[in-house]
Amino acid sequence: MVSADKLACLYEKLLVKDSTKDLEIEMSDGVLRAHSAILVAGSAAIEGMLKHGLAAMESQQRLTWKEHTMEVGNFFLRLLYVGTVDEAEWCKAWGTEPCQEAPSILEIKTPNGQTKFAGRYKLLPERANGKPLWKKDDVKCSHWLFYCSGRWFVSNSQSKDKGFTEGKGWITSKLCDLMPDVATGWQRYDDALSSFVDDCDLSIGEPQPRVPLRLLLGSMEIAKMYMFEDLLEVLVEAVQGRVAFDTFDAILRAAIKIDSMPLRVYCTQYAIGAKHGVRELYLSNVLSPQVKAELAGTWGPSKPSAKRRKL
């Protein structure tokens, strides 16, 4: 019997060997190549397009996925061929993400000082000053990563006792409105100098980087549009695991766009949970129009618009 690992290596070779590919896929920023047999095996819709659609009339078989980038296309094809992801194939283009997303785990590394604050911090359900809140995953201490006055701070139980209302701590970022794993310019308090110093060795990031949400949503849209049923099921499940306060609007908006009922139902059920805070988003009119319309059946109209003055 051939092992699964050897089969994966075989498909990996097919994925990277462009000279054997017979199909072009036009993306928004370039052209990818693929094996038509692989796409046909995953999608009856693709099979019909290549046999009877416009693509069948061309000398070079060609598909058009121009709503998506090469990055999304490469991610989708790797999933289709090998069933794995490769971090080296995507960049940290946070400006292209559909929303900011709070990592469930952050790791602080501070080798030059304030080492007691180093370690892993877990995302908590509650928020502080409208931003996510992390607590060090250690029962022996009470260390917190929180946002206040335009900066991230790492501090101890004193900050918690004051409701995280004071921008004080032993580690801080420069002014920013990004998540801490994306923020730059970290500083730590130097006990010898009695002041904060820049520390380029101090880092806050994910121990295991997540797949960017833009790749999951883009691939899910391709899978739904071209009926890659098996892959769609996997992608919907992965996206469901990313539904949170900060991602809720972007994910439900994507689910509505492609009419993914399993994901729409999941998001609606998530919204009903009071601890998730989605109702506050709904009542404050910060959600997308289509998302508000989706939730109107659950909670009724949000704040009514002001009455127009009549002459």
Image: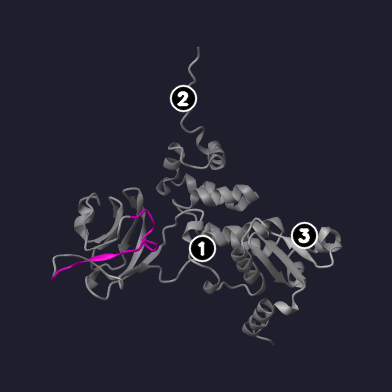
Magenta span: 176-192
Provide the residue designation for mark 1. 212
Q: Nearer the viewer, residue 238 or 275?
A: 238
Where 191 sits versus 217, above or below? below
- What residue do we see at 81% from left, 63% from top? 50
**Considering the numbered disc 3 on the image, is that residue within a helix, a strand or a loop?**
helix
Which residue is the extreme one toward the bottom?
A: 1
Where 74 sits versus 298, above or below? below
**Considering the numbered disc 1 on the image, is that residue within a helix, a strand or a loop?**
loop
Residue 20's spot in the image, x, y percent?
75, 79
Q: Earlier along the polypeptide chain: callout 2 or callout 3?
A: 3
Provide the residue designation for mark 2. 306
Judge depth for marks 2 and 3 and give the one in front: 2
User: Callout 2 environment at 10 Å: few (<14), some (14 to 19), or many (20+)?
Assistant: few
Q: Residue 45 carries which label?
A: 3
Colour scheme of this structure image?
one colour
- The CA distance from mark 1 to mark 2 is 39 Å
Which residue is the extreme one toward the top?
A: 311
Q: Earlier along the polypeptide chain: callout 3 or callout 1?
A: 3
User: Callout 3 environment at 10 Å: few (<14), some (14 to 19), or many (20+)?
Assistant: some
- The CA distance from mark 2 to mark 3 is 48 Å
Q: Nearer the viewer, residue 259 or 147?
A: 147
Residue 311's spot in the image, x, y percent?
50, 12
Residues marked 2 and 3 touching at CB (< 8 Å): no
